[in-house]
Image (tube, coloured by chain):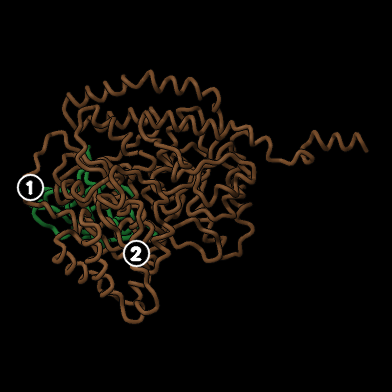
Chain colours: A brown, B green
């Protein structure tokens, strides 16, 4: 199918909106847009970060998901208590594949679930005593942990427990950081506020711990990788490139990260932000308080990697600039071979994305390196500044959809007929049953890493094996294909 | 009275950021921007205007309280 024109895309949006009642139509219309690269600001064309409509299927998560699942969860040497009923912690346990090095249960706790398992009694009489007991118990059972965070679930805010007081007392008792996080699920419209709350908790309870302590030897090439959650090993694939060009990565936020790294971050020279949405708050804070500049970078696909490496190097002296060129040159043969192999198989294929955080815009470059085209993209929980950054990355007259509903997404895919859809696990089976090749772009479909040059090779292979998989030809029942109906007619 | 985070971008222009509104905009003009005094009316690239109590030139980046003078839109 040829690319849609601006008028056709607008007509498509109108057609999809037709089914809604008046009020809902008016509301949803603001969240769907046709991309126009000439616009400077996204608020001219799209509304984002608003409450989802009741009655539609939204794909969003909650503040607890944003804090425990995204920001705090991957900090491996801390124990994160899911404070409240048992479900929230259990169903978010280890699902995000934030890889880490360490012995689980001894000095790393990433895939374990710690919960206060609230029951009626705790709701009625309050859970503070139980929380204090848990902190003592954790110290006894897991003496090598480096700190505790208390991730509030909805009831904590509703019954008004004073977790801050418990945290302060616990901190005195075990002499390790105990961080209360007020990330009750009902706060905000999506997980995005959870990221913000988690960032603020780091700011208030962790970041200042080593202020005035200069015992950590610094170098002029210290950087921190912020907003890389090491999904399938992403942060490792990024880190090798940075170290190869001569930088010293002091901290990883927060994939495979530790609390010590986070405490040392105010000593770095430059903060590198990968996931802007979830961690720009802390970067801005550090810029103001510690005068550490920050830049966004993108390690998806060779074009963007080279661009980013050069941009990072421009903040340092010539040794790093040469280092960046050296790294790019060193991997050139490798990534060129990947492109030569897969581009002919993927050329001209069209992709629709619907993801969170940074990927709806960051992965576009990687697809383009393979000769593919992204014809629609959207954020679950993006804000205006995300869309500002997306408009220039996307082609003209492509679809933008914010907090898309299950129904809209299905209709868009039916009409646009992309060769690949990239979204999350809840969307995966719907589209596969529709016969559309699908990749989970949150967890890389149990593959990865996709960052860096090494990741690009895996990315290209995965896209090829999904799109060119022979199974898509078998999705239709043999008696329903055009050839078979001809045969039936012939027999009749 | 939004809290505004102000910083200089690489081109030396003032960048205006309001966290609550995801508003990130370059300031086109600042009423007072001398060695002794900074502040007054600030006009952003999108046309909206904010007012800062004039103070001694601050060390950017910094968070300051601003008053909205007129709403460019809404």
> Which chain's residue wears label 2?
A
Q: From what the image shows, is residue A134 above or below residue A487?
A: below
Q: Give the residue displayed 36% in from the left and 67% down from the top.
A: A153
Q: From what the image shows, is residue A26 above or below residue A431?
A: below
From the image, tell me which residue sits under label 2.
A115
The answer to whether residue B47 is visible is: no
Within the image, what quadrant is residue A414 found in?
top right
Within the image, what quadrant is residue A389 found in?
top left
Residue A328, image x and y in percent?
31, 23
Foreground disc of the pair 1, 2: 2
Tag 1's secondary structure?
Answer: loop
Q: From what the image shows, is residue A299 above or below residue A98?
A: above
Q: Is residue A336 left or right of residue A53?
A: left
Q: Give the residue displayed 10% in from the left and 48% down from the top.
A: B34
Q: Is residue B47 left or right of residue A436?
A: left
**Please, which residue is most extreme toward the front here?**
A141
From the image, tell me which residue sits under label 1.
B35
């Amino acid at each position: 199918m040829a690319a849609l024109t601006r008028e056709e895309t607008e007509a498509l949006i109108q057609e999809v909106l037709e089914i809604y009642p008046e009020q809902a139509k008016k509301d949803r219309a603001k969240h769907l847009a046709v991309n126009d690269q000439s616009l400077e600001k996204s608020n001219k064309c799209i509304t984002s970060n608003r409450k989802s409509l009741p009655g539609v299927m939204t794909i969003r998560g909650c503040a607890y998901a944003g804090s425990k699942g995204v920001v705090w969860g991957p900090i491996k040497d801390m124990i994160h208590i899911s404070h409240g009923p048992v479900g929230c912690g259990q169903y978010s346990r280890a699902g995000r594949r934030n890889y880490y090095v360490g012995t689980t249960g001894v000095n790393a706790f990433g895939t374990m679930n710690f919960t206060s398992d609230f029951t009626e009694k705790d709701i009625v009489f309050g859970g503070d005593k139980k929380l204090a007991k848990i902190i003592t118990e954790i110290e006894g059972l897991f003496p090598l942990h480096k700190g505790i965070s208390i991730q509030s679930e909805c009831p904590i805010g509703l019954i008004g427990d004073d977790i801050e007081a418990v945290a302060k007392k616990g901190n005195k008792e075990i002499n390790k950081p105990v961080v209360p996080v007020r990330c009750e699920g009902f706060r905000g419209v999506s997980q995005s506020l959870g990221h913000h709350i988690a960032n603020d908790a780091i700011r208030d309870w962790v970041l200042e711990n080593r202020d005035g302590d200069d015992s950590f030897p610094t170098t002029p090439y210290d950087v921190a990788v912020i907003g890389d959650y090491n999904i399938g090993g992403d942060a490792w694939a990024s880190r090798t490139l940075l170290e190869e060009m001569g930088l010293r990565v002091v901290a990883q936020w927060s994939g495979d990260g530790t609390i010590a790294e986070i405490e040392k971050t105010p000593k770095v020279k430059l903060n590198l932000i990968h996931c802007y949405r979830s961690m720009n708050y802390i970067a801005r804070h550090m810029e103001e308080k510690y005068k550490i500049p920050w830049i966004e970078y993108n390690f998806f696909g060779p074009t963007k990697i080279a661009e980013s490496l050069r941009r990072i190097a421009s903040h340092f002296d010539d040794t790093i600039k040469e280092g960046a060129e050296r790294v790019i040159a060193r991997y050139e043969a490798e990534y060129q071979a990947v492109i030569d192999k897969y581009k002919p198989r993927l050329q001209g294929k069209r992709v629709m994305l619907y993801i969170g955080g940074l990927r709806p815009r960051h992965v576009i470059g990687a697809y383009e390196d393979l000769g593919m085209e992204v014809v629609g993209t959207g954020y679950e929980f993006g804000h205006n500044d995300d869309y500002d950054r997306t408009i220039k990355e996307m082609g003209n007259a492509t679809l933008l959809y914010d907090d898309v509903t299950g129904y809209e997404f299905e209709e868009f895919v039916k009409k646009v007929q992309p060769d690949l859809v990239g979204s999350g696990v809840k969307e995966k089976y719907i589209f596969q049953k529709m016969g559309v090749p699908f990749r989970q772009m949150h967890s890389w479909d149990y593959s990865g890493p996709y960052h860096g040059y090494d990741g690009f090779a895996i990315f290209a292979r995965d896209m090829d094996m999904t799109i060119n998989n022979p199974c898509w030809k078998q999705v239709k029942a043999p008696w329903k294909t055009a050839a078979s109906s001809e045969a039936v007619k012939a027999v009749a | 009275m939004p809290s505004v985070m102000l910083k200089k971008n690489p081109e030396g222009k003032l960048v205006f950021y309001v966290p609550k509104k995801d508003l990130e905009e370059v300031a086109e003009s600042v009423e007072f921007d001398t060695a002794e005094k900074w502040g007054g009316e600030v006009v952003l690239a999108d046309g909206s205007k904010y007012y800062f109590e004039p103070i001694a030139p601050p060390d950017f980046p910094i968070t300051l309280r601003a008053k909205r003078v007129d709403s460019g839109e809404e």
